[in-house]
Image (cartoon, rainbow, N blue to C red):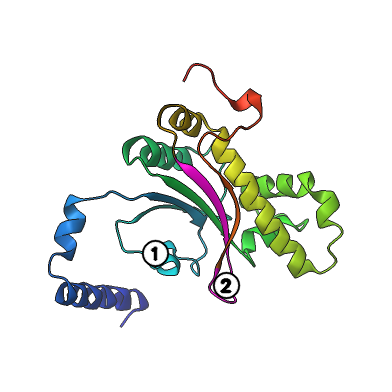
Amino acid sequence: MKPYEKLLLENKSWAAETLARDPEFFNRLVNLQNPEYLWIGCSDSRVPANQITGTQPGEIFVHRNVANLVVNTDLNLLSVLQYAVEVLKVKHIIVCGHYGCGGVKAAMTNQSLGIIDKWLRNIKDVYRFHRDELNLIENEDKKCDRLVELNVEEQVLNLAKTAIVQRAWKHHNAPHIHGWVYGLHNGLIKPICEMPAGSHVDPIYEYDNL
C-alpha cells in the first residue's frame, strides 16, 4: 500500500465511525456553516485548530500560513477575512502562533532560504521593532518564544488596521480579536493579547467613510 492510500482508508473509517455515532452528522454539515470563530494559525502540522480546541467541523473557519501572518497584500488571507467577517459574521478572530515555530526561527537567522525570504521579512520587521528587548534574552529558544508572542501581537494589530475589520467594528461592533500561543510541549493555549471590537489603533488607520 502506498502511503497516501492509507489516508484514504483512514478517511473511510472515520466517515463510517462518525455515521455510526451520529447518523445526521454529515447532513447537518451540508446544510449549515455558521462558525463563531475565524482562526488564523500556522501551517505547522502539529497545530490543527479543531483538535487543540476540541471543536467539531463547522465550528471554526480556518486560514493557515507559515507563522500565522496577517499581511496587507496577501489576497488569500484578505479574501478569507472578508468572507468570515462580512458573510459568516464571525464574532471572534483568533491569531494563534505556537512556541518553537520554524518560521520564526528561520526569520531570526541571516540565512537566505529562497522565495520564503520575502514572507519571513514580515517577522524580521517584528524583530526590528523589538530588538532592544529581544537582544537582552541570551537563551535562543526563549528568545524565539518571545518573538513568537510579539509576532502574534503584531498580527492582531495588523488585523485591526484592515478596512474589513474597521468597517465591521463601526457597523456591527464585532468581531473581537484574540492573540494566542499554543505550547507544543504541553498542548495548552496561552492567551497573549486581545482587542475588543471598537479598540482604537493609530488614527491614520481609522477610516471615516466606511
Residue at image point 18% right, 76% down: 21
Q: Position of residue 46 (x, y in %)?
A: 50, 70
Residue at image point 66% right, 29% down: 202
- The image quarter in which residue 107 lies: bottom right
Which label is found at residue 50?
1
SS assignment at label 1? helix
Which label is found at residue 77?
none
Side of 147 where 45 appears, left or right:
left
Side of 90 where 161 appears, left or right:
right
SS assignment at label 2? loop
Residue 200 within the magenta-colored segment of the rendering: no
Residue 181 within the magenta-colored segment of the rendering: yes
Residue at image point 15% right, 77% down: 20
Q: Position of residue 47 (x, y in %)?
A: 49, 66
Instruction: Please say if 97 is above or below 1.
Output: above
Q: Residue flagged by tag 2: what amino acid is it?
A: Leu
Residue at image point 28% right, 48% down: 34
Query: Could you classify mark 2 by the number of other residues whose Cα lies within 10 Å: few (under 14), some (14-19), or many (20 or more)?
Result: some
Residue 190 appears in the rendering: yes
Check the picture and name the quadrant holding the N terminus. bottom left
Residue at which label 2 appears: 184
Side of 8 where 170 appears, left or right:
right
